Amino acid sequence: MSREVDATFYAQVEPEWGNYIDSDGNRSIHGAKVTTITQKRPQRPRGGTVLVKLTIRVPQAAFQPLRPEAIVVIPEDMTAVTPVEVVAEDPT
C-alpha cells in the first residue's frame, strides 16, 4: 500500500502582460497568474487562458491529526500519600 495519495486538478493560467511591445507588435509577458482551479476539466475555459492539468502527491501522514504523547515520571519523593478514612454506618 502506498504511503502517498494523488490529487488531480485543473488550473486556468492567464498571462500578465507587460507594457513593452516589440518591433513585430507583440506585447511582452512578464508573468502569469492562476485564475481558476477546478477538480474537473472545465467544458469552457476562459478566453486567453491556458488550461493545465496538475497532479500532486501528498503523504498520507499529512492528513493525520497531531497526536502528541508524553510520559511524565514523578519521583517517589515528590508524592504524598493521603490516608483515607472510611466510616461505615448501619442504615437500620
Image (tube, helix red, strand yellow):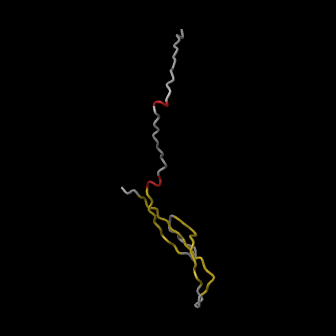
Looking at the image, residue 77 sits to the left or right of residue 20; the answer is left
Q: Image point 56% across, 68% down: which residue?
A: 36
Looking at the image, residue 2 sits to the left or right of residue 86; the answer is left
What is the x, y in percent for residue 5? 43, 59
What is the x, y in percent for residue 37? 54, 66
Q: Quadrant of the C terminus?
A: top right
Q: Residue furthest bottom?
A: 23
- Towards the viewer: 9 or 26: 26
Q: Residue furthest top?
A: 92
Q: Quadrant of the N terminus?
A: bottom left
- Residue 9's place in the image compared with 25, above or below, is above
Quarter residue 15 falls in: bottom right
Quarter residue 29 falls in: bottom right
Q: How many marks?
A: 0
Q: Residue furthest front?
A: 77
Q: Image point 53% across, 65% down: which residue?
A: 38
Q: Residue furthest left?
A: 1
What is the x, y in percent for residue 28? 58, 82
- Towards the viewer: 29 or 48: 29
Q: Image point 60% across, 84% down: which residue?
A: 27
- Towards the viewer: 50 or 58: 58
